[in-house]
Each structure stands twice: as C-alpha cells, then as structure tokens.
Amino acid sequence: MDLSTQYLGLTLPSPVVASAGPYNAEVANLLKLEAQGAGAVVLPSVFEEQVQRDQEILDALVDHGAESTGEALSFFPSHITEGFDTARQLTLVEEASKALSIPVIASLNGITDSGWIDYAREFEAAGAAAIELNIFLIPSEPGITGAQVEARYEAVVRAVASAVSIPVAVKIGPYFSSPGAMAQQLVGAGAKGLVLFNRFYQPDINPATLGIEPSLRLSSRHESRLPLLWIGVLAGRVPASLAATTGVETADDVVKFLLAGADVVMTTSAILRHGVEHMGTLVEGLREWLGARGVESPDAIRGRLSHRLIKNPEAYERANYIRVLQGYQRH
C-alpha cells in the first residue's frame, strides 16, 4: 500500500504530520517520529518577540561598561550581537534537514514586516523544505476593522511568499466573517497551503491572586468538528494544499479529515499525551482502515465527503444545524 501524499508540492511518505510542538525541538525526537511513519515534521515556532527580547538583553550587556576602558571595546566579538533564539532555531533547522529524509517545515510567528521576511529567508538558507506562517493577530483595539485585519494577513503572506522560493503555508484561526473568502485571499497572496485551524490560547483569571494566568489544555477530539467543517467546504474549491489540525487523536480522526478533503492531517496533542509511538499508531491505523476496504492509497478517499462531491451538500450548511437541534430535542 502506498501512503505517499503531496503537500505544498512536496512528496511525503504518509499524510500524518507531526505539527509544531515542544517535542519537535530535538533532532533525536524528530528521528523517532520519522521512524514511526510521520510524513513530515513542523518545528516549534520562532516568536519574533522572544528574539527581540533576547537581543535587547544582549545589547544591554554588551553596552554596559563598554566605554570604561579601551580594552572593553574588544570584550565581545561582533557576531555576538546575533540573537540567541534565532541561532538555536537555525541550528535545529539545519541539523534536522540533514538528519531526516522527510520534509522539515520551519514555523514562524512574527509581528513586524522585517521579522517575517528576514527569518523566513534564514530558514530557507538553513535547509527548511517549507515555511509555515503561524499568524496570531488579536484585534484587541475596538477601532480595528475586519477588513484591516484581513489586509494585514494578506500583506504578511505576500511579503514572505515573494521573499523565499520554498513553499509557504499559513496557519490561521477560524475567526473571520467569511473563512472561504479569506482562504482565497491568502492563496492569491502566494500561500501554497492552509493549515486549519490555529488554537488561540486565551488566558485565565485567578480570583485568589487577582492575576492573569496563562492556560494551556491539549486539544481533544470534540474540537475537530470546526476544522472538519471548513476542510470539507474548501476542498477542491481553493487551489492550495489543505492541512487539518486540532483534535486529531485516533486513526479514525485521520480518516475523517482525509474524507473531507485534507491533504495532510497534523497532530501535536496526541503525541504529547501518548508518546511518540502514537504516531505509529495513527499511521498503521490508517493503513489498516484502507486495507480493510481494499483501498490502495489515501488519494482514493481524499475528498469523497467534501462539500462539492457529496449528494447532500446541505449537510455542511444550515439544514444540518436544524436537523441536529431537532433530532436532539426528539431524543
């Protein structure tokens, strides 16, 4: 059976991808994921704020007392002004790209135009097969309009896509007035793939300490419905690769997303929850599901239950909403 899959113009040995997460920060772990059948790996995101903060601290240390004596000017070599975080991430990209035979995708979460472009170019030079733009933009100012937010996303994608020759995917959230139109705008700006959806981690409030606390919960299967909906709606309608993420826990979840039209299915929480061997469980589970039905490859089922191919496309729309509510009330 051939599980090979095309994603962003790259050939992957399987459609199951290890998405960005802390486990992917070590080459040894990436090799284990590859051995378990991962089709590709996405490295942890580089956050431009972290790089800038490291740079500010380093600059302060270099400048402190630098003019105290003539010799002080030579305390630090010129290359030390390179950011700590960037150097580590570039080393990871370079080492992973050399060690693995599957595509290594670098993830970038920037805040400024120069940050997006500069780091993207550095990742390409380090050997990344593709770049995933993890755009996290919260329009917290009430005066910012939806059109302005969308224009910002489009500008980021256009700038990065025009600055590198490797394919660029965009990981976005679902909070657009028209996700379908937004998807078309991003593809028009140069995105070769869309990753649906980003999980925006909201903070929590601690009543005891009267403080804001970060909160993180691993995704669960019930969260897969939203990306499943939009993968199904966009498949075959947007000329770009589609990657599903969030709520991928079992091989059945992988199959569902493929049936809806996903090119690849990404998971992080399941790996963190169950260990690296779970990647093998997902891949082998997909292989068994296909084999039990005499199907030779994921291509044979991809998109068979997408919006444009099913006989009752209203299942993706308002009729399904009404049917579900009325069915529950009768139950």
Image (cartoon, helix red, strand yellow):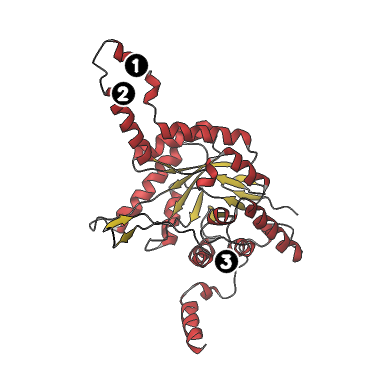
Q: Position of residue 126 (x, y in %)?
A: 52, 32
CA separation in Å, label 1 and label 2:
8 Å
Question: Does dot 1 land on a helix, a strand or a loop?
Answer: loop
- Residue 128: which disc? none
Q: Is residue 191 toward the left or the right of residue 95 in the image?
A: left
CA separation in Å, label 3 and label 1:
62 Å
Q: Which residue is mark 1?
A: 75
Kindly indicate whether the residue at mark 1 contacts the one at mark 3 (C-beta within 8 angstroms): no
Question: Does dot 2 land on a helix, a strand or a loop?
Answer: helix
Which amino acid type is shown beneath numbered disc 2? Val
Local packing at callout 3 (Cα closer than 10 Å; few below 14, some 14-19, many 20+) is many
Residue 17 versus residue 72 in the image, above or below: below
Local packing at callout 2 (Cα closer than 10 Å; few below 14, some 14-19, many 20+) is some
Q: Is residue 113 toward the left or the right of residue 302 in the image?
A: left
Which amino acid type is shown beneath numbered disc 3? Ser
Q: Quadrant of the N terminus?
A: bottom right
Which amino acid type is shown beneath numbered disc 1? Phe
Local packing at callout 1 (Cα closer than 10 Å; few below 14, some 14-19, many 20+) is few
Q: Give the quadrant of residue 209.
A: bottom left
CA separation in Å, label 2 and label 3:
57 Å
Kindly indicate whether the residue at mark 3 contacts the one at mark 2 (C-beta within 8 angstroms): no
Question: Does dot 3 land on a helix, a strand or a loop?
Answer: loop
Q: Nearer the viewer, residue 221 or 298?
A: 221
Q: Position of residue 166 (x, y in %)?
A: 52, 39
Q: Which residue is mark 3?
A: 306
Give the mark, 2 or 3, whose residue is nearer the N terminus.
Answer: 2
- Nearer to us: label 3 or label 1: 1
Q: Which residue is mark 2?
A: 62
Kindly indicate whether the residue at mark 2 contacts the one at mark 1 (C-beta within 8 angstroms): yes
